[in-house]
Image (cartoon, rainbow, N blue to C red):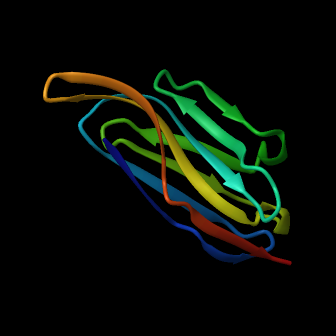
Amino acid sequence: QVKLVESGGGLVQFGGSLRLSCTASGSIFRIATMAWYRQAPQKQRELVAAETIEGDTTYSESIKGRFTISRDNAKNTVYLQMNSLKPEDTAVYYCNVNAETLDSGIYSKSNYWGQGTQVSVSS
């Protein structure tokens, strides 16, 4: 199993910045993709940004140029640097990883979610 621990959320004013972190732990063999999703009230969860182990990145159009995803493979950690925050960025942000585990000789590949961290942007 893989456990994800997120941190870095909070309340910030319009135009401010926050940095989210998510660290994965467990019997991890390899993490193919690390991503951030968000879910605002009464809205569906949406992909914000993702990065593959090869370094390829994907961004939602709504945050391009303002947010940057990065990962530290040695630490199994993914970051989301959020600049120029807007009230419409207010949401619960979830870390997601597609991880391969090797536990007691048993190989497994699965998708894991963090518990979520609240980001609130005031106008």
Q: Please name whichever residue, 37 or 74, is drawn nearer the observer in this view of the structure.
A: 37
Vertical side of 109 occupied by 116: above or below:
below
Q: Position of residue 96 (x, y in %)?
A: 53, 43
Quarter of the figure that contains the N terminus:
top left
Q: Position of residue 102 (x, y in %)?
A: 23, 27
Q: Please name whichever residue, 114 or 59, is drawn nearer the observer in this view of the structure.
A: 114
Vertical side of 90 occupied by 39: above or below:
above
Residue in the picture at 70% in, 41% down:
47
Q: Where is residue 60 in the image (x, y as percent from the top left)?
A: 77, 39
Q: Identify the image quadrant of residue 65.
A: top right
Q: Identify the image quadrant of residue 39.
A: bottom right
Vertical side of 45 occupied by 88: above or below:
below
Q: Where is residue 31 in the image (x, y as percent from the top left)?
A: 40, 30
Residue in the picture at 75% in, 66% down:
90
Question: In the rendered view, does 13 fall on the left or right side of 1?
Answer: right
The number of discs equals 0
Residue in the picture at 33% in, 25% down:
108
